Amino acid sequence: MTAQAPLWEFVDISKAYPGVLANDRVCIKLLAGSIHGLLGENGCGKSTMIKTLSGVQQPDSGQILKDGQPVEISDPHAARAMGIATVFQEFSIVPTLSVGENIFLGNMPRSTFGVVDWNKVHSDAAAVLAEMEVDISTEAITGRLSVGEQQLVEIAKAVAMRARMIILDEPTAALGEGEIERLHDLLRKMRSKGTGILYVSHRLDEVERIVDEVTILRNGRVVRASGETEITVQEIVTAMVGEDIGEHYPKEHNAKDEIVLEARGLATHNGVKDATFELRRGEVLGLGGVLGSGRTEIARALFGTDELTAGEVILNGKPVTFRKEIDAIRAGLALVPENRKFDGLFFNFRASGNITAAALGSLARFGVLDLKAEERATHDLIGDLEISVQAEEKTVNFLSGGNQQKIVIARWLFSNAEVLILDEPTQGIDIGAKIAVYKLINKLTRAGKSIVLISSDHDELLAMSDRIAVVQHGTIKRVLNAAELTHGDLVRASAETAGIRELEEAFA
Amino acid sequence: MKRIFDAQLIGPFAAMVIVALIVALTTDRFLNPGNLSNLSLQVSIVALIAIGSTIVIFAAGIDLSSGSMVALLTMILAQMLKFMGIPLMLALPLILVVGGLLGLMIGLITAYGRIPAFITTLAALIAFRGLALTFNNGSPIFSLDPALEPIFYGKLLGIPLPFFYLVFFYGLAAFMMNFTKLGREIYAVGGNPAAAILTGINVKKVQTTTFVIAGFMTAVGAVLMSARLNSGSPNYGQTLELQAIAAAVVGGASLAGGRGNILATLMGAMTIVIVQNGLNLNAAPSSVQNIVLGLIILLAVGIDMWRAEISALMGRLMGRPSVAPAAAKKKAA
């Protein structure tokens, strides 16, 4: 790449919140036709920077240059007018509206009398989607699309407003492998048309794949800016965490021979059919497969969320029937759901209320809670799992994603669950917190607990599992030793036999 | 104790004190003992019903049925005392049970029938009023029992009895919400029902229980209403459900569920009644009272929603260093 004038230049941007300097003289140069990675652990100041760049808030000091001219991004409208589009982690699409309506939301083409020109809405939207080579009907109700497709609609909004700078905040957090590939193709295409893209992600493997240059933040400051030089994943991790963390996946092998749980020929109305596997004491059994292959559905079948139409679950040698989640929990199972925000945490409680929620009975005598014992147990677990001590005093919405995830897992330590199903336990948390979760998995298996691990991060799944069950179409194709598999094997194994076509259809 | 008297009480308490000060300064009769004792009588019925309404709100429900349920229960009580010859000492516990059962019915339909609480209780609001009219050809029943009135007007150590009912039931409710498994589960269900299910909490049972509590507390309110006028009437309790919800909201309970302090509801009820009392003492017409009540509800929720802005404003007024947007812009330019 030749030296060229930057499209946007952010110079010495500082922003303070009460008690914390969130951005401290951050400089970023964004070139046209380039994908710029903005990396850092949670709380490093990425989100603050994104808010400033998209006009949501004003910096305390610093300068913003557009094509070399100083400008002020006074609010989100101004940002849009200047060609900045932001795709936030939480989508801003309206699920009940059509794709076309969403693409032009707030900016509908009008005809003579100020009435919305529906023909133009749909033809323009179709043109944008065609330009992106995305095959989605503009009439489709957006909420019925897959998450990956919704993500594409979000980006189509940016394309439709002819944005010259697109900010993507964790764009792949909810996407499967195939969908990520599809998104990356699209971004490369946009890059070739001269769009500048600011790409914020936790997934280092994909950063390596797509990003041209990176800026790494730590504690609100730029600690590394690559410019045009190559930078390895190991260097990125070291810069983000501030120390050489050495082993990325600290796997311990704690599996015994004793079988704790057996699923025989499980089937549900939700697409699970003839799912059979066994789980040993202290083992991590990974469920591998593409998004929508039925991994989460198998977990639901196991946990009593979906009714079994066939098959049986055998726990410690005895057949058990779970009519509802509560039966599974009483029997010693636990589910750490994929979406901890919506399904896991009580934001109105501090750590204590969240940690003890699944085992209030153990704290109660005649229905009255022993609050002292609760505080003690919470205090111990917070120390044990290295959760931020703030959690004792503040409600959990003030905590980082990593701390929140640890609290959800701590809940099942407190309730003494024997089998834990972890559904995407490291999604959206930073590398330091991920390693903490891996260590926690070790701690659990060391204590003789068994884990079913569901993860879309193939490297993580391979490294942290003892065995991997490959899931396809709601059934388990085969179970393999994790050590014998490579990343490529897993992708192939889960896509094999009609899988490839499925993968393509997911985007068709 | 620290747990019950937490920071959530400061706002509602301050509001109550400010309102009381204003009323005390604008009228000379507010602080006289007769008026204050009258005030505790006035607040008692709304405040007792509001315990149930608030607990339902904590579990992210809403109870619109209490006003009509009061009318229905006073008619059933009157029927039992006047025409069925059931003695008072038996009729009182019976009416409390009936209240609980009506609440149970609403709760079961809401939780297990998967009909939103707003709809079930709206339907109950309309139907209960109709049901009340089927007794005694729709006419009020008077002079029920001479022993009924002292329940409301009686005094112990010179203090009106309703004061003790308030202390007892609010004490019980505060204990339940803060120290029991059920209280914790109610907050959990209101805070995040999806998470509550995955945590093994029986969400439907908890939701149903809140409506049983609400029905029971409404029956307590209905007994006081009957005692106050020694009668039953299908017209009693109109808009009582809204006043009870207003008390919860002024007390800072979040209608989204999961957040709030039950004792703050008592302060919310007091605030509302003090304002009404002040307007009465100043001879304001009832139309003005309703307008003011509406404004208070708006203000209470507004203060909650604008908390960040207000504290920023206070900070600036107090001269604390904070980042003013104007200054930031100047530097940036």
Image (tube, rainbow, N blue to C red):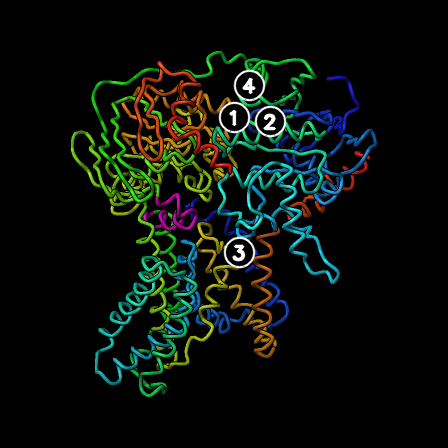
* Residue B145 x/y as whole percent: 29, 82
Q: CA distance from mark 2 to mark 3?
A: 39 Å
Quick check: A88 above or below A252?
Answer: below
Residue furthest to the left: A318
Disc 2: host chain: A
User: Does residue B47 show up magenta in the picture?
Assistant: no
- Indicate the amino acid at tag 3: Phe
Q: What residue sits right under mark 3 in the picture?
A: B13
Instruction: Look at the image and tell me whether residue A498 can be seen.
Output: yes
- Asked if both marks, 3 and 4, belong to the same chain, the answer given is no
Label 4 crowd bin: few (<14), some (14–19), many (20+), radius 10 Å = some
Q: Amino acid at mark 2?
A: Cys
- Spatial CA distance of label 1 from label 3 is 42 Å
- Which of marks 1 and 2 precedes in the sequence? 2
Badge 4: chain ID: A
Residue at (56% x, 76% y) in the render? B280
Residue A44 badge: 2
